[in-house]
Amino acid sequence: MPQFDVMDPADVRRLQGMLSPENYLRALRRILPRAHAGVLSAIQAAAPHGKSGKLARGFDVRVVTETRALLRGLEVQILARVPHGHLVHEGHRIVARGPQRKGLKLTGARRRELRNELKARRLEVRGRVPGNPFAGRVLQQQQGQVLAFVERELPRELEAAVR
């Protein structure tokens, strides 16, 4: 078995040549979630803490294989576990909702009437809540640390895959 200097870029290229593209992507797929662990904790610290704090506690990293034309690669997605995470991050319109219907027995005609009133109210926008792009700022700040982690761990992972 040949020996490789895991810090030498030329050896990394030789290791890549010894592996199939699938094995190389598999090695990257194992490294990327670990590389973004620090990013997750920084995003959780930077996230707005509302009444419940659920947004700040709920982020996950997902590594997805992406194919564009003839190129295959990996995309790292940082996802909020709460359904309103994108509204906080990107902002949203303020829309009037109207009365609650909890516990009411509605006939079909009354339900249609309330639905039409709601549609009419949605046409009038009462303002806009600006977005808070906290995750984008953190990703920009942490990009150097993520790259350094990948550069440090990828040669070791490739060498382990060759064995």
Image (tube, grey):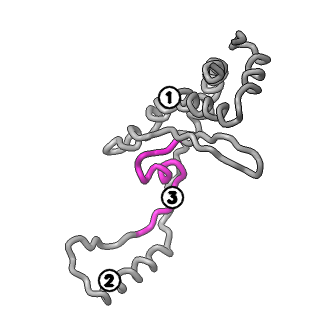
Res. 145 visible in picture: yes
Q: Is residue 12 above or below residue 126?
A: above
Is 94 magenta? The answer is yes
Q: Which mark is residue 121?
A: none
User: Closer to the observer: label 3 or label 1?
Assistant: 1
Nearer to us in this view, 60 or 135: 60
Give percent across and percent down for residue 68: 72, 50
Q: Element type at marker 1?
A: helix
Residue placed furthest toward the bottom: 109
Give percent across and percent down for residue 14: 77, 21
Nearer to us in this view, 96 or 60: 60
User: Closer to the observer: label 1 or label 2?
Assistant: 1
Range of residues picked out in magenta: 78-96
Q: Is residue 45 above or below residue 4?
A: below
Q: Which mark is residue 111?
A: 2
Identify the residue under disc 1: 37
User: Closer to the observer: label 2 or label 3?
Assistant: 2
Give percent across and percent down for residue 78: 53, 41
What residue type is disc 3 on? His
Identify the residue under disc 3: 92
Which residue shows up at 69% across the image and 12% down it? Answer: 1
